[in-house]
Image (spheres, rainbow, N blue to C red):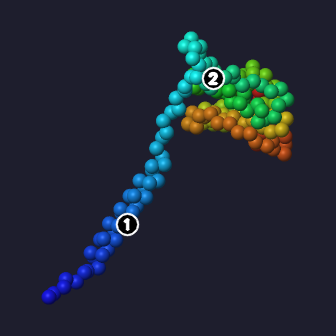
Amino acid sequence: MTRRATDGNGIRRRRATLVAVIATASLALVLTGCVAEPAPTSTSSSSDPTSSESPTPTPTDAPPPALVPNGTAAENKPFFDYLNNQAITAAGGQPDGPAFINSLRAGGFAVETMELTPDITTVGVKADSVQFSVHAPDACLIGQWGAVGGYTSIIAAPLATGKCFVGQTRPIDF
């Protein structure tokens, strides 16, 4: 009686198949936890068919943020962002530095606390982005607008000079 010898390739193939089966089963188990739950449905315990519950306010129903006079940068950042997004919309998505400054001024921020970078570079072409700031009592609210990056804002500590920006800024004389 002759016995067929098991070669190393057969064992490797079986091991590879076993590893693939275990990996697939593990992945299926992990993905099972990623299934979305159905949205909760509201049930009314009221027996009066004419009564209705007040709808839950949505973010669009919320009043716009407001200026907190002498407030911190964190307290005024929602209003800062709101005004800057309004300026972007009002300018048809193509605002310049004065559009942001005028919007912030109209919103109640003091122009004396603002800084603005030039819209035009030293070689006379439109800048890729413009930065603007409001110096709050505790920190700087800094916004940036660019055609490529869109709008972003941060809160940052003022520089040792007391300013928000390094270098030459544009005079706010408009």
**54 to 5, vertically: above or below:** above
Give the position of the C terminus as an image quadrant: top right
Q: Nearer the viewer, residue 10 or 114?
A: 10
Give the position of the N terminus as an image quadrant: bottom left
N-terminal of the pair, mark 1 or mark 2, is 1
Residue 121 in sight in this render: no
Q: CA distance from mark 1 to mark 2?
A: 52 Å
Q: Position of residue 44 (x, y in %)?
A: 56, 22
Q: Alpha-carbon neighbours of circle 1 within 10 Å: few (<14), some, or many (≥20)?
A: few
Q: Nearer the viewer, residue 97 or 158?
A: 158
User: Quick one: which residue is furthest to the top in this view?
Assistant: 50
Q: Nearer the viewer, residue 121 or 5?
A: 5
Q: Position of residue 61 (x, y in %)?
A: 63, 21
User: Quick one: which residue is furthest to the left in this view?
Assistant: 1
Q: Position of residue 167 (x, y in %)?
A: 76, 41
SS category of the residue bearing label 1: helix
Residue designated by label 1? 19
Residue designated by label 2? 57
Tag 1: residue type? Answer: Val
Quadrant of the image occupied by residue 145: top right
Which residue does the image show at 57% across and 17% down from the upper left? Answer: 47
Tag 2: residue type? Answer: Pro
**59 to 143, vertically: above or below:** above
Which residue does the image show at 25% across and 81% down from the upper left? Answer: 6
